[in-house]
Amino acid sequence: MNATQRLARMPQRRAEGLPTGITSVCSAHPLVIEAALTHGKARNADVLIEATCNQVNQDGGYTGMTPADFRTFVEAIAAKVGFAPDRLILGGDHLGPNPWKHLRADQAMSKAKTMIDAFAAAGFTKLHLDTSMACADDPQALPDATIAARAAQLAEVSEARVRQSGTQAPSYIVGTEVPVPGGAVEALDHMHITTPDDALATVELHRQAFAQLGLDEAFARAIGVVVQPGVEFGNAEVIGYHRRPAASLAATLSDMPQFVFEAHSTDYQSAEALRDLVSDGFAILKVGPWLTFALREALYGLNSIAKVLAPRAIGQTLPAAMEQIMLSSPEHWQKYYPGDAREQFIQRHYSFSDRIRYYWAMPAAQGAVDELMSALEGRIIPRPLISQYLGHLEPMIADGSVMPEARALVLANVVRVLDIYAGAIDGATRQ
């Protein structure tokens, strides 16, 4: 049994009273992916890596990669670290018209169909169908039946491609009670938890829409429903999971044993909250910004270390280089970061939303990171400097589990977050 087959069995395990969970790594950064695969290898665990419709699509997305490119990219990293291919699951997140919602619905859906065809052709085996966003000629709030009908149309394209290419049949995720990909823009002054009736209605409407297109067998492979359990994060705040308000939603799973819940925006939750989410049936925990936040945190810490150890080896500091890049291309942060100039500066570099992640793939940013890493290459970094600028990694240096070298420190800071998820899932499944 491979990783995709084990993923498909998660609802069955849940229905049998065996809590089950998996971390969904939503990132296209090579160091984050390397950290995730190295972490999975060390634990002998499956790794689920997902690309959003904005990151990766037939037009390249903001990473410049098509689904086939992304698969090649991830598999190359897996080969480099020695990660077993049969333990890798590739997923597509929020697959639908979102990147083209400025177009008429027929045009946007045509683009979305081309995109999901590309994901299916590339062998992605976890596909989140998200057609909830209004297009240019749609009413602002789409009827639920329209959302389900459009999702079924995308599944129809995916199924046709799978039959033609002979790739492994995918598992589907439906529903989308979360902000659209890219993050919420409103203040987090309230939190709407999905009601049991809404969760059941989402499943039933999708079941009907699939059936109308003769896709009953495809719907039988739908394993997850995206719901809002009451978790979210903003620029400087985190809303943590509380079991009691979500208890009635969690209990709904007993009425739909085919499914587990998929929880988005679980970044920055405590280990206890993540464990409770898994125990309550929110089995797929999506994390992305927290991982690239940890990456940025490590790089900025190394920048401070380099200013002490090798001040002549770097020209412009990494934060200064990233500030220049973000100011010259403000489209990825400007509408998300309110406030005056000082507040926006802090958010550009330190926000939990971590919209700086959109810039790391740019050549100028890659050059700045390469210069920093070259300045520290081959150096053993003194423990006192690690304690000063990357203090939470110092105990790992002390016990020898992490080498005091620049690249190892970056990877370790990302793995530190993945360890929180792994520990929470392991804790829930042992209960």
Image (cartoon, rainbow, N blue to C red):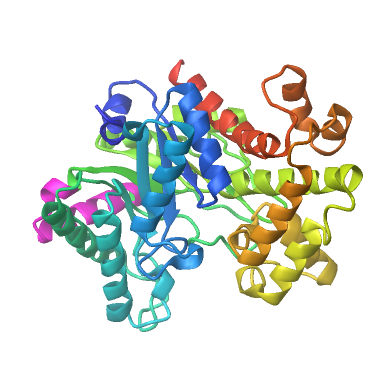
Against 118, residue 174 (above or below) is above
At a point 60% along the width and 29% down the height, the residue shown is 271
Residue 222 appears at what percent x and percent y? 25, 45
Q: Nearer the viewer, residue 300 or 215?
A: 300
> Number of callouts in the render?
0
Q: Is residue 138 left or right of residue 422?
A: left
At a point 44% along the width and 20% down the height, the residue shown is 429
The range drawn in magenta is 198-218
* Snapshot quadrant of residue 240: top right
Residue 171 appears at what percent x and percent y? 26, 44
At a point 39% along the width and 27% down the height, the residue shown is 20
Q: Is residue 392 left or right of residue 54?
A: right
Residue 239 appears at what percent x and percent y? 63, 45
Q: Is residue 179 left or right of residue 204?
A: right
Q: Is residue 261 visible?
A: yes
Q: Is residue 148 visible?
A: no
At a point 39% along the width and 43% down the height, the residue shown is 75
Against 317, residue 412 (above or below) is above
